[in-house]
Amino acid sequence: MMKTRTLKFATLVVLLPLFVLAGCANDGSNTFGPKTGIGGALGAAGGGLLGAAAGGGTTGILAGVLLGGLAGGAVGNVLDQNDREMANRTSQRALESQPTGQAAVWRNPDSGNSGSITPTRTFQQSDGRYCREFQQTVTIDGQENRAFGTACRQPDGSWQIIS
């Protein structure tokens, strides 16, 4: 009984920041952009899972979520506007036409930041939409950060990250 309750709480602690941060898109009304939100969400999820795997209990999991979210958000926030535009263009191009397993790369000579996106699997959902799983790497000041996700093709032809 206690393990089930702890597991449910841990799941809530990990998922809640994902939903909160997912709603924080950059619509021009603030400086908290989508990369900060995505970085924070991935960091929070990873931190929570690491806390749970380390047997940290509720306090350890919560600490992992908070610290992971802060670290991930910081990574996303460090990318300047040109970095974000380059990463977005490369992601859209890779998801649309890059063969599975082949990386598409970008590099900003002004900031020195770089990254890659590698589609890892393509599939069609029951509603007919095409989706691709991918691995994304972003290198900032020599520090490599990795993320995984799934994006689906929208009716307008663009790709939207769904997880």
Image (cartoon, rainbow, N blue to C red):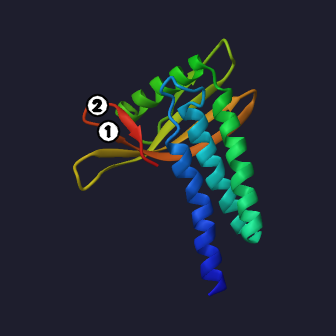
Asked whether, in this view, residue 4 is left or right of residue 99, the answer is right
SS at badge 2: loop
Q: Name the residue at 49% across, 42% down.
A: 23
The amino acid marked with disc number 1 is: Arg
Q: Name the residue at 65% across, 30% down.
A: 77
The disc placed on residue 100 is: none
- Residue hosting label 2: 157
Give the x, y percent position of residue 72.
Answer: 67, 42
The disc placed on residue 153 is: 1
Q: Name the residue at 58% across, 39% down.
A: 37
The amino acid marked with disc number 2 is: Gly
Q: How many marks?
A: 2
From the image, which quarter does the N terminus lie in?
Answer: bottom right
Classify mark 1: residues with Cα within 10 Å, few (<14), some (14-19) or many (20+).
some
Tell me whether circle 1 and circle 2 mark residues in contact (CB < 8 Å). Answer: yes
> Quadrant of the rendered structure where residue 142 is?
top right
Q: Residue furthest bottom?
A: 1
Give the x, y percent position of residue 136.
Answer: 55, 39
> Quadrant of the rendered structure where residue 11 is?
bottom right
Residue 55 in view in this figure: no
Q: Residue furthest top?
A: 110
